[in-house]
Image: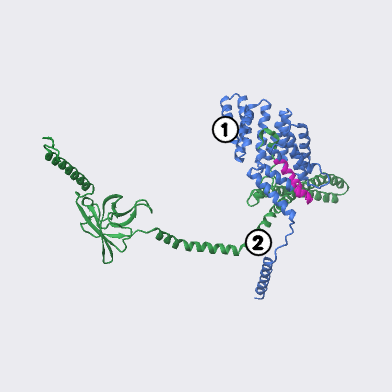
Amino acid sequence: MRVRGAVLHVLAAGLIVLAAGCGGKAPLNNTSLAQSRLAEAETRAAALVKSGDFSGAARHYGEALRIATSLENADAIAANAINLSIVQQWLGRDADARAALGAVLDDPRTAFSDRRKLQAELRRAILELAGGNIGAAAIWAGQAERRCIATNCEYAATILNVRAQVELDSGHGAEAARLAQAAAERSRGGASRAESANALRTLGRARLAQGQPAAALEPLRQALELDREIGDPRKILADLAELARAAEAAGDAAAARDYRERSLAVSKAMNGARGSAEAVLVR
Amino acid sequence: MSVALPPGRFSGLVVKVNAFLLIAMLLVAAFMGLVAYKQGWFVRQSVIRFVTPNALGINKGMPVKLHGFTIGSVSEMQLAPGGVDVRLSLATEYLMRIPQDSYARHAREAGVIGASVIDIVPGKAERALAEGARINFEPSRGISEIIDDFRRQAIPAFNEVKAAMSQVGRSGEDITQILASLRKEVEQLPATHRAIRKLVEEAGQATADLSQQAGTTLQAVERVAGTMQRTLPDLSDKLGTSAVAIGAAATQMQHTAEEAQATLRNARPLVDHGETAAREAADVLGAAKRVWPLSDSFKDTSDGMLPIDSFEARGKGLAR
C-alpha cells in the first residue's frame, strides 16, 4: 500500500509538472523586423515561382538577397543568390544569373557552408554549359565534384550529368555515355527522378552520337516515361525530339514520324510562339 | 309665285324610297346579328357563382378563363351575406369540362401587371359542375401583400446578419491578434524547415560515419587476427623446440587464436548486419524525407531552394 501511494504521488507530481509546462508562457519571439521581411520575401518569391511569375520571383529573390546580405546571414545569402540565378536563367538573363552566383563564388570573406559553395559551383557549371562555354563548365563541374566527394553530397548524379553533357558537347560520345550511365546508376532508386531521366536522355544522346541509334531508343523511352511521370513538358519535348532522331537514324521512318508529330503537338500545346522554335529541334 | 314641275319627274318615288329603307334595315339587322353572334348571344350560357369577401379588382365583363382559354365572363355582381356574390356566365359546352371541386381565383394574364381575369383552376373530381353551382374563390395577392410576406420572411435573416456583423465588429481586435500570431508562425516556417533539414542531414551524416567507422574497425580487427594467425605458429614452433611444456602452452595459445579467429569470423555477419542497419537507417531517413508532413519540406532540394537541374545546361532553346 505504501508503494502504491508513492507511485501515485510521483504520478501526481509528474502531471503537475506537465500541466505547468503546458500552461507556461510561450517563448519570446526574437524575430527581428528584417528577418521577418527576409522570410516574407522568400515566401513570396517561392509562391511566384509556383504561379509562373518568374519576373516577380526574381524581384523578390533579389530583395531577399539584399536583406540577407544586410543581416550577414551566409546561408540565406547563398540560398537566395542560387535561387535568383535559377530564375534569371529561366528568364533568359544568363549574365544576371552569373552575376547572382558571384555573391557566393566571388566572396572569400563570408563563411559559406561547403554545401552552398557546391550548389553555387554546380549552378555555375550549368550556366556555362548552357552558354556554350564548355571549358569553363568542365572546370566548375570538376570543382563541384571534388567538393561533393569530400562532403558526400546529394548532387553526385547532377554533377555526373553535367560532366556527361560536357563530354557530349566536346564530341566524346563514349566518355559521355560512361558518365551518363554512372549518373543513371547513382540516381536510381533515389529521390531525384529528374536527374535519373536526365541521365537516361544523355545516355541516349551519347549512343546516338556514337552511331548506335537502336541502342539509344531504350534509354530515351525510359527517360520519356519518367518525364511524363514528373510532368515537365520541356523534357517530354526533348525526349520526343531525341526519339525522333534516333528512330530515323535506326531506319524506322514510321516511328520517327510518330515521335515528330507528338513532339510538334507538345510544342504547340506548350506555347504557340515558342513552339515553332522548338520544332526546329525535331528536324 | 309657283313653279310648275315637269310631268313624270317623281314617278315611282315611293317605290324607290321603300326599297332604300328596306336595304338599310337589312344592313342594320345584319350588323346587329353579327354583333349578337360575336357577343355570344346565340350561344347557350350557363351560370356558376362564387362569393368573395372582397371583390376589389373584379369587374363585370371580366373574362373567365380555363387553362388560359376564355370560356365566359363575369355577368353579375351583387352584395350578399358574407361578401359579394359574383356570377360567371360560361358557355354551356365548356361547363362539362369543369370538375366539381374546381375553384376560381383572381389572376393576371402576365404576372403582376397583366390584365385581370378570373381563372378557373380545375379540380380532380370525375363529375362536372352543374348549372348554377357555387365554387370556391381564392383572392389574389397584391404587390403590397407579396412585399409584406417577403419582409416577414427576410427580417429574421437580416437581424441574424446584423447580429453576426456586430459580433465580428466586437471581436475584430481578437481576429487581428490571431492573424498577427499566425503570420509570425508562418514567417518562422522557413527557419524551421532549415533546422529540420539540418537535423536530418546530421543524422544521415552520423549514420554514414557510423558505417564508415564500423568498416574501419572490421578491417583493423581482421588485420590483428591475420597478424596473430601468422605470428602464433612461428612462436609455437620456436617454443616447442625449447620446452615441451611451453610448446603445449603454445599449442594451447594457437588453439585459442584459432578460436578467436573463429569468433571474429562469427562476428563478421554481426558487423555486416551493423553496416546493413546503418545503410537501412539512411534509407529510412531518406524515406522520411518523402513522407508527409516532411515531404513538403524536403521536396526538390528543400529549405526553399529551387531544384538544381542539369537539364538547364542544355541551353536557351528550352527555357521555361
Q: Main secondary structure of the magenta part?
A: helix
**For this view, does B69 lie left or right of residue B222?**
left
**For this view, does A248 lie left or right of residue B33?**
right
Identify by letter the chain in blue.
A
Q: Secondary structure at mark 2?
A: helix
Q: Find the magenta span and give its range.
A: A65-87
Residue A191 % position (x, y): 66, 44
In this orientation, does residue B110 appear? yes
Q: Tell me if residue B146 comes above or below residue A16 in the rendering.
A: above
Q: Disc 2 designates what residue? A: B177
Answer few, some or many: residues within 10 Å of disc 1's Cα (few below 14, many 20 plus, some between 14 and 19): some
Query: Residue farthest to the top?
Result: A251
**For this view, does A114 lie left or right of residue A54?**
right
* A88 is within the stretch colored magenta: no
Query: Residue farthest to the bottom?
Result: A2
Q: Amino acid at mark 1?
A: Ala
In this orientation, does residue B259 appear? no
Q: Tell me if residue A170 comes above or below residue B217 in the rendering.
A: above
Q: Chain of mark 2?
A: B
Residue B280 % position (x, y): 68, 48
Query: Residue farthest to the front?
Result: B1
Quarter of the picture holding the C terminus of chain A: top right
Q: Are marks 2 and 1 on the same chain?
A: no
Q: Colour of chain B?
A: green
Answer few, some or many: residues within 10 Å of disc 2's Cα (few below 14, many 20 plus, some between 14 and 19): few
Q: Nearer the viewer, residue B63 or A16?
A: B63
**For this view, does A275 lie left or right of residue A173?**
left
Q: Disc 1 designates what residue? A: A265
